[in-house]
Image: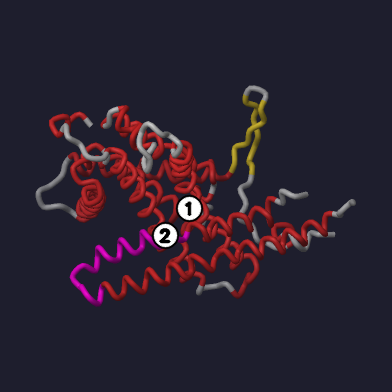
Amino acid sequence: MYEGLMLTSQNDVDFMIHGLFSYNFFGQELWITTSHVYLLIVVISLIIFFIVGGQVFRKADKIPGVFQNILELIVEFLDGIVKGSMGRNADGFKNYIGVLFIFILFSNISGLFGLRPPTADYGVTLPLGIITFMLIHINQFRFNSIGSIWKDMCSPLPPWLPIWLPINIISEIAVPISLSLRLFANVLSGTVMMALVYGLLKWIAVIWPAALHAYFDLFSGAIQTYVFCMLTMTYINNAIGEREDVAKEEGI
Amino acid sequence: MEFNESFILGCSAIGAGLAVIAGIGPGVGQGIAAGYGASAVGRNPGAKGDIMSTMLLGQAVAETTGLYGLLIAMLLLFVKPLI
């Protein structure tokens, strides 16, 4: 009766995650879904890319070839954005932010190759947000004393009057949720839009969807990658704060 | 009083349409940010790279509230929590 409302049933519009097979995990039924498979494809191609890149760098030339040139460009760009936004604290985070950037970028643009982007699954972006949350608080406790953290959490009011504490705690918890939801919803909206174009227009959608792909997959994906990494770095840098102990710098 | 499924689905569709109105706010905000970015580039063309990256970062953060509305609409249409 109401099947006309469900786009997925009558037409060919399909952007959902499909379960492949289920298994039993301590009495709980869990599913291996298509987003696991696509995530695996992205990760395996990245691992191959990294292994080949490592081999190239092992016998690097003074006069770089084409592939070595591209790799150096990528590494210099990533190091540059980390250095630009974290300044003195950059050294310990260059590797993590670089890997995060490349992973999210490849996940977002995998829609170009006919995959459903793995980042359009909230189960992929929430762990990324939680890793950022853990990094923020581990670094806060590593570089600040307990007293200054307490003072920071009671921030607008003096530290002996912790009325503002619950509100600050809620705003800390909101950080990973808003980070992950932003990435998820952006990629999902692109995926839904492309599925609608291909599913409802059928033979009319021939060549011109390439422009939509360029916007939704390339431009939007790259912007969201940049924003995720930038916000991660800004939050971590704020949590570290002013460091008096520059002598401890090598121990990040 | 008993409601049948098609009534609930129709109301969910209306609610999804209302939720997407949340896109007005980010549209206005992003436009303002882009306008000020353009005037900043006009005043200081040398700092174009920094202005662009700051503007895009701010716009992407401002977009979040609109995306929350979109998420609510999607939940109402495809997950159908009210049935």
Name the residue tied to disc 2: B60
Residue found at x 50% / y 74%: A208
Mark 2 residue element: helix
Q: Bounds of the magenta span?
A: B41-63
Q: Residue furthest right?
A: B1
Residue found at x 69% / y 61%: B15
Q: Nearer the viewer, residue A235 or A127?
A: A235
**Is A216 placed above or below A171 here?**
below
Tell me: A28 left or right of A213.
Answer: right
Circle 2 chain: B
Q: Residue furthest top?
A: A26
Could you tell me how many numbered marks the image carries? 2
Magenta span includes A247: no
Magenta span includes B49: yes
Query: Residue B81 location in percent, x, y?
Result: 71, 48
Q: On the same chain: label 1 and label 2?
A: no
Mark 1 residue element: helix
For marks 1 and 2, give the CA distance. Answer: 9 Å
Residue found at x 33% / y 72%: B36
Query: Residue A116 location in percent, x, y?
Result: 53, 52
Q: Nearer the viewer, residue B7 or A61?
A: B7
Which amino acid is tagged 2? Ala
Query: Residue A240 location in percent, x, y?
Result: 27, 38
Tell me: A88 left or right of A225.
Answer: left
**Is A52 placed above or below B60 here?**
above
Name the residue tied to disc 1: A182
Residue found at x 47% / y 63%: A216
Which amino acid is tagged 1? Arg
Q: Nearer the viewer, residue A32 or A45?
A: A32
